[in-house]
Amino acid sequence: MEDIRLAYAMNRAEELGRDVWEEFVVPLFFDQLEVRTQRKSLVVVGGRGCGKTTLLRYFSHNSQFSSKRHDIPASDLDYIGLYLRADTNFLSSLRGGGLTDETWHSAFRHSLACDLGIEVLDSLRSINCDESRVRRFGGLKELQFEALRNFDPKIGISYEAVRSYLVGSRDQLLTWINNLESGGLKPVFLPAEQFVKRLIQLVRDQLPYLRNSLFAVFIDEYENLHDYQQRMINGLIKHGEPPLVFNIAMKRHGMQVRGTLGNESIQAVSDYRQIDLEERWETNFSLFAAELLFFRLIEKQREVAAYVPIDPTVLRDISKVPDRRDNTGYQERVLGAARKLLPRLTEADLATTAFSNSRILERLHKNIQQGLNAWNSNIDPAKFIRREAPDASLVSGALLNRNRERPETILEELEKYILKESNRFDSSEWIKNNLVGVVLQLYATGQTPCPFFAGFENFVLMAHENIRQFLELVHQAFVRLPADIDVGTVLIHIEDQAEAVRTASSSFVREVRGCGTFANQLHGMVLTLGATLKVKHQQVSQSEPEITHFYIQRGDIDDDLDMYLRESVKWSVLFEEPETKKKSMGAKTFEYVLNPVFAGHFQISFRKKRSLPISANDLKIMFTGDVKSRDAVVKALIGEGRSASNLELDLSLGDD
Amino acid sequence: MTEPTFKFRTSTYESFAQAKPHETDILFVGVGVDDRGSQAINELSSTSGTVVELLYDPEKNELVVNGAIQGLRALVNLVRGKKVRVESTTLGLAEIIRVIQASKSAGLQEIEFTYLEPKTYTQGKSPVGTYLNARDFELTENRVFRAIHGFAHQRMADTKECYIFFLGYEVSRLLQAFEQPDLQVEEKYAVFGVPPFVSGWETNALANHAADLKRLDFRAIHYCAANSVREAYLKLWAIYSRLRNEHLTLVISPLGTKPQTVASALFLIETKGGPYPTALYYDHPQRKQGRSSDVRLWHFYKVNW
């Protein structure tokens, strides 16, 4: 029996391999994508971990004609997906070395011709992957490719001979690149588009079951291509037509150039249709996440099926998507089960839990005393710590450290709150606006992670429409289960979830160091911004609770800063969103939200509540400054002279 | 080539004055970004008839020799019949590879490498800020894994590979290596510099990588002296001899100390075109200005083939 605690260990598409037929949970927007009926090229956009590669691999022949698939409708042969992944390291070698640009363009076309040619041939093998399929479809042994000899007389005639030629020719290209100085033997360069089209035509002419097939190329990691390589692909996108069309997938801002190698350029709508996966996930991500949660459990241990409200065969079935999406009863059952598995605390429970922790009470007492001292008040701090009103007591600690309400007034309102009379904790929304911020502040100085992070809904919010992030959060929670867990009653304790979030979050912060060419600048920015937000969260007054995003208040966004911001968005370190409130007159009207999955590492809120103005200059220092200047930016942003360990009474006007 | 043939003679000194290096005809240097780089270029220049500055552009796959783009042939003509010294502290892997290739093509039997150990890395020396810790920031930036002509490698669905990563302080270099498309390889080994330049530094290097080596499921960890070109070279040969297989490509990723990088360059050149394929996986880092301070030791490595 497999260990269900490891059900979420694999959370990268690459770990699943090319055939994802069994593992693919059909997204709830799938029927709106209209991929198989595409009329023009598709550009799939989204951050890493949002499911681009898995989706592309699902459309590829490896999955669509998987040996694990028992019934293939004839109509499915009308659409053959070919998957190519840009091998950055290798493709970067197709440049320089004293050769002309034209030579490298031809070499890249040749590389494409070989890879695509092999994919076309492999798709036929996928269709005919077993005896019964060969009986139904077949014809590979009889295929004749003599016409391909017009490209190179050395090309063989049979299926195997052509495939072998293409593999050899691809190897020859590599050998030539590695022996440029000694005049290595250059392969006969094949023209990608013409060669592959001819190959497809020969296949369609000879295999009746593919007579109407459209061959759709999916190029993954398009953003990693050189400019000229992108231009060449752009040309194929612009001029692609049945039976061969080109689609790409890339991170946001991944298209460096819109031009082709000629004088044309490609534009959304007229030349391609963009599918923004993160935008698609905005609807129903919670339901999908809950389904995936149980799907993975069943995959790991079949016995779990008796206890969970999903059927894996339904989740794999495209035709069942509307049933899942439109059935509110089903949704409630699935979401309810997910909430039971990963319970959360309501705000009232959060307050009660905090109140039951002696260390938190000590910190609260200290905060209250500090506030009373600032007001020169002799009221006994214990009067503000009331077991019958944990939430109002916790919030009082912050209110006393502001210059708005006198201690006597706050105490009076607290008494009214306890007596359930009309009071400002409710009417002025003191609790609603401040409780989470106060709880985060009280936990921040200790070792225990804040229980605020627990809960399925909170995992979904932190994952921010990102499947990989969601799965990693769940993985870290599951590995904390005991080995002898009863699958029928499994639930993950609040403390374990909170600890899991901190671990997963720290690992995501660490991974920023691997995010592209400017990874260290991005990582430095995350640490500096995170430190700033953390200190803001630790301010006792909580006059601005839950600051989790920023906007650029003043200064020019120069080319460097613009590039760093684009890289941050590309790697999902920051999310760029239109400003909710118009705060500046500048041309740029965006807010930048720190990826909420980092919240656990800094023990700050993951909810988009308040924003922080940052000057362009300070932001640039966050990316590129040395430790000293970055530290100075943190100091300036939190208010000169104030530090995390020595917070003074905040005498600025509150924002409650 | 099926066994190591390169021979090494190493000399180590506490200062340039103590080293009293012999005269050479050509000194190849890069750009000095810290004390030791500047010292190396200034002091060693006085011992050489000609000083040649090299810079490799990994985006364009071009070698710039004294400000002009040049092919390998120009470099061959430059070194033919000359005594060559390569100041490796200031050069990157690509430049070092090209000089070795040129020297071999020109018929030279020996070249000498120099490497200056830093006294301290500024990362460790910087004061800890109130909010930020200098240890969280790294020594290099703007890295990108790019092939070098002569040692390129194409990953295929059916390719069998084994990766050897030399690792130093910076875990980001390893993380970035695995962020590249599809780098899911089973056979992978890490090599750390032990003994390190300074006792205790290895703890930082190991601690920085421990979690990721486990997560990425590395097969084994090897050790070889951080400052020994010979040990790193023989370590590569030891692994290669054990694994060699004409259907398996041994990919070297030198992300550790410069002596290990020099060893990787020598190994790749020696095994290039042999029966058991080898390749390079490298990220061409830009070293940060002022990344280290002072000089601890001067190393001179003579390599014969």
Image (tube, rainbow, N blue to C red):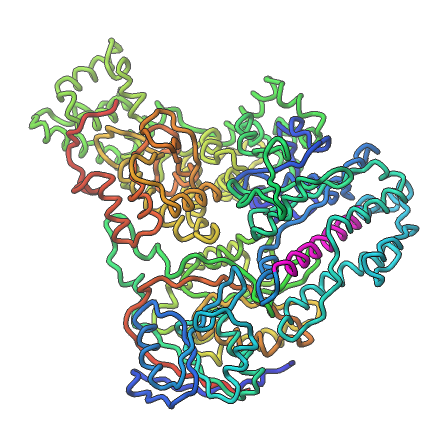
Instruction: Give the camera-side residue of A349 and A225.
Output: A225
Q: Quadrant of the N terminus of chain A?
A: top right
Does A499 appear above or below B151?
above
Q: Is residue A275 above or below residue B212?
A: above
Judged from this view, the residue extending furthest toward the front is A263
In this picture, residue A485 sits left or right of residue B30: right
Where in the figure is residue A526, as x and y percent of width and height? 37, 45
Q: Report the quarter where the C terminus of chain A lies.
A: top left
Q: Position of residue A199 (x, y in %)?
A: 82, 49
Q: Residue at x 25, y 30 (%)?
A: A542
User: Left or right of A538: which side holds B300?
Assistant: right
> Which span of residues is magenta-colored?
A101-123
Residue B58 falls inside the magenta stretch: no
- Residue B114 spot, x, y in % from top left: 40, 80
Res. B221 in view? no
Residue A155 in picture, x, y percent from top left: 84, 60
Residue appearing at x 58%, y 44% in the figure = A259
Taking A478 as reference, is A191 above or below it? below
Residue B121, above or below A376: below
Secondary structure mostly seen in magenta is helix
Query: Residue A530 lies in what quarter of the image?
Result: top left
On the image, which quarter does residue A369 sit in? top left
Residue at 40 percent of width and 80 percent of height: B51
Residue A118 belongs to magenta span: yes
The answer to whether one can see residue B283 in this image is yes
Residue drawn at (41%, 83%), measured in percent from left and top? B50
Q: Nearer the viewer, residue A556 or A326?
A: A556
Tell how many labels. Answer: 0
